[in-house]
Amino acid sequence: DQQVKQNSPSLSVQEGRISILNCDYTNSMFDYFLWYKKYPAEGPTFLISISSIKDKNEDGRFTVFLNKSAKHLSLHIVPSQPGDSAVYFCAASAGFQKLVFGTGTRLLVSP
Amino acid sequence: DVKVTQSSRYLVKRTGEKVFLECVQDMDHENMFWYRQDPGLGLRLIYFSYDVKMKEKGDIPEGYSVSREKKERFSLILESASTNQTSMYLCASSRDRGEKLFFGSGTQLSVL
């Protein structure tokens, strides 16, 4: 049972435009959500997180939105840059349980 | 910054070999994890450990075992490597349970 779903395996955007990556979850007990970025042949690196008491968190060009009623999480990248091309994983946890990861979305930002 | 070091970036082994993947973290983290990443399947948890000499099965433990004799070191063992274990293996650690993970650079294992 896939508790965290990233339904879009890939996304292509032009440099300077907005990238929106989506993530849906089924477990209403999840209270902490994260996004990771992964380049080929490297380990994932932490990007941004949000707890369930908030609905938005910003860090520079990256903003994560949480819609608890819809069980939906999104990552906005504005403006997108070619260096943002990577695979993005969303992840969630409930209390002190281990993180559950989505299957990833490959973002390609073209010049 | 947390550093999680995996002993090999690339590894080629033959079917039936016993394979050891080593991981060391330098931030005194309690929790350590082994994942594998395959295209279209995301990150799948193999084993994890919340303390020294402690281990728990993840979602796909079959064909693997682990060892945690020291807090900073977590080893993944493929008892008898098979071709379907060709994958990118990622080690991670965290300070507290449910918190963000710090990942190593990964080991790309090919089993021929």
Image (spheres, coloured by chain):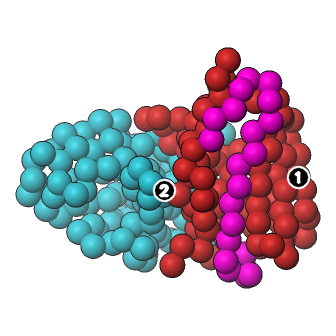
Which quadrant of the structure image shows residue B53? Answer: bottom left
User: A44 left or right of A75?
Assistant: left
The type of residue carrying mark 1 is Asn
Say which chain tag 1 marks: A
User: B64 left or right of B107?
Assistant: left
Estimate the x, y position of residue A101 in percent, counting from the top left.
Answer: 57, 62
- The answer to whether residue B51 is above or below residue B83 is below
Q: Residue at x 12, y 45 (%)?
A: B112
**Could you classify mark 2 by the number of other residues whose Cα lies within 10 Å: few (under 14), some (14-19), or many (20 or more)?**
many
Q: Which residue is nearer to you in this view: A33 or B106?
A: A33
Q: Which residue is nearer to you in this view: B73 or A56?
A: A56
- Circle 2 residue: B42
Q: Which residue is nearer to you in this view: A14 or B10?
A: A14
Helix, strand or loop at disc 2? Answer: strand
Which residues, given as a range, are shown in magenta?
Answer: A11-30
Tags 1 and 2 both on a single chain? no
**Could you classify mark 1 by the number of other residues whose Cα lies within 10 Å: few (under 14), some (14-19), or many (20 or more)?**
some
